[in-house]
Image: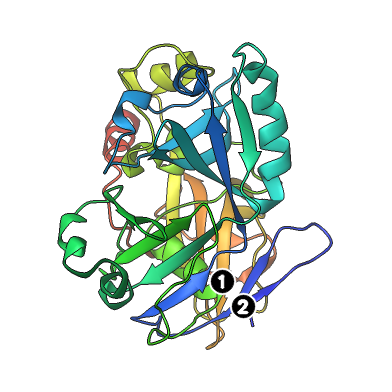
Amino acid sequence: MTGTETPVSATPVYTSAEFPPPASGHILLTNRVLVRISGPGTDKFLQGQLSQNLDDVKTGTSPRAAGATPKGRAYCLTRLVRDGDDILMDLPSELAESIMAHLRKYMMLFRGTSMTAQTDGKIIGLLGNEAASSLAGEGLNSLTSPGDTLALDPGFLIRTENTAERLPRFELWQPNAGDLKLDSIPEKTLADWQASEIAAGVPMLSTATSESYVPQMLNWQHLNGVHFKKGCYTGQEVIARMHFLGQLKKSLFRFRIAEANSIPTPGTSIMAGERSVGEVVNAVGFNNGSCELLAVIRHDAANGELLTDSQPEALLEQQPLPYTVTERKDSAREDT
């Protein structure tokens, strides 16, 4: 059981997550692909394409990053892990092929540098400290902040963001197949992990939302995914201008639908009366009939009555995020 249904679009629909969410568990994240970038031009290549400073990708620290079009629209949201001289990154399964094809156009300038999907690799999501402790032992004490990384025999254990309800979360990246000692930890579903991602305010792009948003609209800067002081990279001018001039008018919000007839799909419009004020980015359904979602919403509409275009009778209830989006306050001051 994976907790997903896959329609023709190939974008997973996550159903039947446990409510209340489980406090402990491990999940094989089959909706993500590990990719390895190798060769003498690895850092220079990625430095010119991603929003993160490669100097900050080092042993023990694995920050997030975004890839953007020249217009600053994100087509890739990823994390970067240092593995010797190589860099590992993760991509959504449904977008992996197109993202890699796009990046390889620029890689041609860096002789001897390659990008390959790790066909034997896997990512395992871990809910709660128990699962992480069973792998890391006392080494878990070194993982105090999101992005902190511990090299283990089976791969890399990465601290990721807690949920707003303070559930600790981790990811185990295994570039190569290896044995795990997780028999005592209950196996959960992809829907359970997706629910934790939404509760942590961590978005994932899909076919419907790729190239739709500047990274800040997805709160990526608050997930340490945008370095505003690094040198030039594709899309930087637009991303930097929005940051330094305070022009962010929409951002990512978390909502709940108490009684959901269906799960909103990515790209579904969010309505304030007759006006569209945003779109669904990710959603998950729970086994009690409720639903949670992340949506990019205009700041001037976020506190009003909101509905999804697909369920006009179901009111959206705003839920907390584990971080503060300071730009919302700036936007509110400008509008008064």
Q: Is residue 205 above or below residue 238?
A: below
Q: Which residue is mark 2?
A: 3
Point 27% across, 51% down: residue: 323
**Mark 2 surroundings within 10 Å by alpha-carbon count, few (fewer than 14), some (14 through 19), many (20 or more):** many
Considering only order in the chain, which callout, 1 or 2, is on the residue closer to the N terminus?
Answer: 2
Residue 179 visible at all: yes
Point 57% across, 52% down: residue: 281
Q: Residue furthest right?
A: 8
The location of residue 266, given as percent across then percent down, is 65, 55
* In the displayed structure image, the side of residue 144 where residue 261 appears, left or right: right
Name the quadrant of the C terminus: top left
The location of residue 224, given as percent across then percent down, is 32, 39
Look at the numbered disc 2 and give the secondary structure of its residue: loop
* In the displayed structure image, the side of residue 82 where residue 190 appears, left or right: right
- In the image shown, does 234 or 124 lie closer to the viewer? 124
Contact, mark 2 vs mark 1 (Cβ under 8 Å): yes
Q: Is residue 251 above or below residue 183?
A: above
Which label number is shown at residue 190?
1
> Identity of the amino acid at label 2?
Gly
